[in-house]
Image (tube, grey):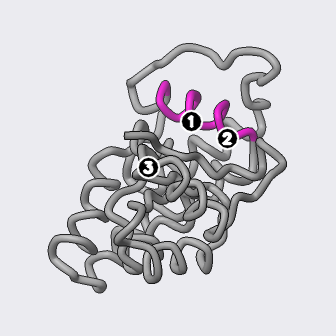
């Protein structure tokens, strides 16, 4: 099986639901799409109208809760490397238990971190966050640079306030 990756911010092309379904029809091995477009309406259209043809995986961190509620089966997101327990809890709250009260509580802990990731150089922020929670994965590769010290301090505060990291 092939996973098509819709990431217009990096590719400059938004495949959109129609193109993705056309691709999956033309290439039968395309069974999944990771949608990192940030468009919740595109994800919803894919799930609601084309779930029999293609499995949608959310790829935009701050759209994860909506994606799960809309019916995506999974999410491929950097945050799972940093806070896997919270990410699994969110999935269980929404997909397994269908408990939106618990899900919104979990989401309120996750959202500030996810919003931070999307507000800066994503790869650098994920790698710095991994190191801060005790799971160093090494530096980013060029052209990406480490986070500036001011952003690193913001990240430390967010991780501490969300209960993920002890204040040091």
Q: Position of residue 79 (x, y in %)?
A: 47, 46
Q: Position of residue 30 (x, y in %)?
A: 46, 48
The residue carrying mark 1 is 126
Q: Mark 1 falls on what kind of element?
A: helix
For the question of whether residue 95 can be seen, the reply is: yes
Q: Position of residue 94 (x, y in %)?
A: 27, 74
Residue occupying the point 68% across, 53% down: 118
The residue carrying mark 2 is 122
Q: Mark 3 falls on what kind of element?
A: loop
How far separated are the C-alphas under marks 1 and 3? 34 Å
State which mark lies toward you, 3 or 2: 3
The residue carrying pointer 3 sits among few (fewer than 14), some (14 to 19) or many (20 or more) residues within 10 Å by Cα, namely few
Q: Is residue 108 above or below residue 5?
A: below
How far separated are the C-alphas under marks 3 and 2? 32 Å
Q: Is residue 8 above or below residue 106?
A: above
Residue occupying the point 57% across, 41% down: 156
Residue occupying the point 61% across, 44% down: 155
Q: Classify residue 17 by image quadrant.
A: bottom right
Query: In which quadrant will I find the N terminus?
Result: top left
Left or right of 42: which side holds 142?
A: right
**Magenta stretch in the rendered image:** 121-131
Q: Residue furthest left?
A: 97
The reply to whether callout 1 and callout 3 are in contact (CB within 8 Å) is no
Q: Nearer the viewer, residue 150 or 124?
A: 124
For the question of whether residue 165 can be seen, the reply is: no
The reply to whether callout 1 and callout 2 are in contact (CB within 8 Å) is yes
Q: Classify residue 128 by image quadrant.
A: top right
The residue carrying pointer 2 sits among few (fewer than 14), some (14 to 19) or many (20 or more) residues within 10 Å by Cα, namely some
Q: Nearer the viewer, residue 12 or 88?
A: 12
């Amino acid at each position: 099986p092939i996973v098509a990756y819709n990431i217009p911010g990096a590719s400059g092309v938004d495949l959109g639901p129609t193109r993705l379904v056309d691709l999956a029809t033309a290439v039968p091995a395309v069974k999944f799409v990771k949608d990192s477009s940030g468009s919740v309406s595109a994800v919803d259209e894919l799930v609601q109208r084309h779930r029999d043809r293609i499995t949608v995986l959310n790829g935009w961190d701050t759209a994860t809760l909506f994606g799960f509620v809309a019916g995506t089966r999974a999410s491929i997101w950097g945050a799972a490397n940093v806070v896997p327990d919270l990410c699994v809890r969110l999935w269980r709250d929404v997909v397994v238990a269908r408990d939106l009260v618990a899900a919104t509580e979990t989401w309120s802990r996750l959202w500030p971190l996810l919003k931070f990731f999307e507000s800066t150089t994503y790869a650098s922020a994920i790698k710095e966050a991994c190191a801060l929670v005790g799971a160093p994965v090494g530096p980013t590769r060029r052209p990406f640079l480490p986070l500036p010290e001011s952003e690193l301090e913001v990240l430390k505060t967010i991780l501490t306030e969300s209960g993920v990291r002890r204040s040091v």
